[in-house]
Image (cartoon, rainbow, N blue to C red):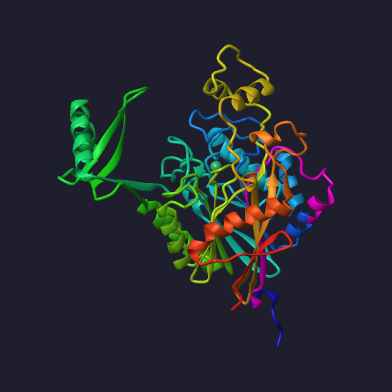
Amino acid sequence: MYHYESDQGNLDIALLGDCILTRKLSVFRESRYLEMVNSIRKNDLVLANSEMLFHEYQGTPAWDHGGTHMASDPNNISELHWLGVSMISCANNHANDYGPRGVLDNISNLDKFNMPHAGTGRHLTEATSPTYLDTPRGRIALISVTATLPANGSYAGEPTSLDRGRPGANVLRHNIQYVVPKQDLNALRKISEGLGFEKGKKRLVVSRNPGLRVDDENNFQFLNTNFAPYPKFEFSNFTVGDEYKVITTPNVEDLNRNIKWIENAKHFADWVIVSIHVHDCGKEETDSPDFVKEFAHKAIDAGTDIFVSHGSHHSYQGSRGIELYNGKPIFHGLGGFITQSSVKWSPWDAYQRYGITDQINPTPSEFETRRSSIGREYDVDRIGMHGSSYVSMQWERKECVKILVHPVTTSSQNVSIFKDRSRGTQGRPMPAQGEIADDIINRIAEMSSEFDISIAKENDIGVINLNK
Ligand SMILES: [Zn+2]
């Protein structure tokens, strides 16, 4: 009988987290750095979240953007290949930094350099649908979605018979319910009436949204009306309760669309990975928001094998805990792995945002100096806070048997202790050692304890043994 290797259900995977890449990685040669690169490369699959757009500034800078307007030379995609990255997720808050053209330019450059990608597309179906990677040990599907996006940008649109749809990202929106004591709800009602929002709500909003929930004694929609540059209506939903609480739930339409495509991916692949970009947090900044936790469990119920979240840039690098749900790992937050956020050119909008209004073309150094002078530095209250980690996993017979947490430092010009160091260090990962490695692992262990996951330490690496 002939045995197929891919039938064995064995796979080694590395997940790198957020990669903001604007410069080369392949020119450096410290032995510890090269050892790390080799240990990443030996995996069957290496997944990174590309919080970057690869283009040559043909697109138009978006007014509603993800922070830094991201731009990297398309040739840098080869640097990701050099690192061993075999697949990337593109749905994140930077997807639309250079408008629909930027989305399309990024996709065509990734295709040109043979980098499989998911999460953005010419329209919503393409952005939501998985990309596949064939490896000798099986076929892997990736669905990429973002829960964080600029207010007016990013969300891809479907085509109709008359138009082409809108290039953009696969988005998971969410609903927020604020729970407050009754007297606070009544105070909001009074404010809304006093400022005239109630009239606007009845006249302009309820009439255009027939399904809108009607206020009652214990529920109130506080209408926030912004009249510049044109009237824009947003609601905050308040309800009465005994304690102050924020309840978040996934938007049903976005949830169902993603679940449908996860089921489709399960049909065609041996492993399904769902990658989500989330800046938000739950009650504590180290928690995932409730709507992401709900999505993670539903995604696994629908056939996802690995659920990975990233983007929680809290306390600088933003790692979160690790959970096992029905035997499938959920990574609640991988931190920043490559953080080279110095782009070649920033647009006029960025200068305006940082108050540089007296010149049209400040040099990038003037811009960076101004930006870091107004509170871009993060507090580093624990030594491991300027560290991050990537994870790797071993799967045997389709079971996840081992997870390794590899602590790294990724120095950044935004952290004061790295400010005067060489540009060759900045944003580039290096394996952490000793006290720093310990602190990074301890921090992730603390955040994973609520999920009954314990992490042992072996030679500066965190080890989670799941083999029963
Ligand atoms: Zn982000």
Quarter of the view holding residue 39: bottom right
Instruction: Report if residue 85 is visible in the image.
Output: no
The residue depicted at 18 percent of the width and 44 percent of the height is 214
Left or right of 421: which side holds 405?
A: left
Closer to the camera in the image, 286 or 178: 286
Please state the horizontal and vertical placement of residue 301, each as a whole percent of the image: 44, 67
The residue depicted at 72 percent of the width and 59 percent of the height is 460
Task: Look at the image and tell me in which quarter the N terminus lies.
Answer: bottom right
Residue 18 within the magenta-colored segment of the rendering: yes
Quarter of the view holding residue 453: bottom right
Left or right of 114: which side holds 152?
A: left
Please state the horizontal and vertical placement of residue 72, each as a whole percent of the image: 67, 36
Please state the horizontal and vertical placement of residue 269, each as a whole percent of the image: 57, 67
Task: Look at the image and tell me in which quarter the C terminus lies.
Answer: bottom right
Judge whether 311 appears above or below 150 on screen.
below
Q: Which residues are magenta?
A: 8-35
The residue depicted at 66 percent of the width and 77 percent of the height is 8
The residue depicted at 41 percent of the width and 45 percent of the height is 161
Quarter of the image where ligand 1 sits? top right
Closer to the camera in the image, 274 or 444: 444
Judge whether 40 appears above or below 412 on screen.
below
Tag count: 0
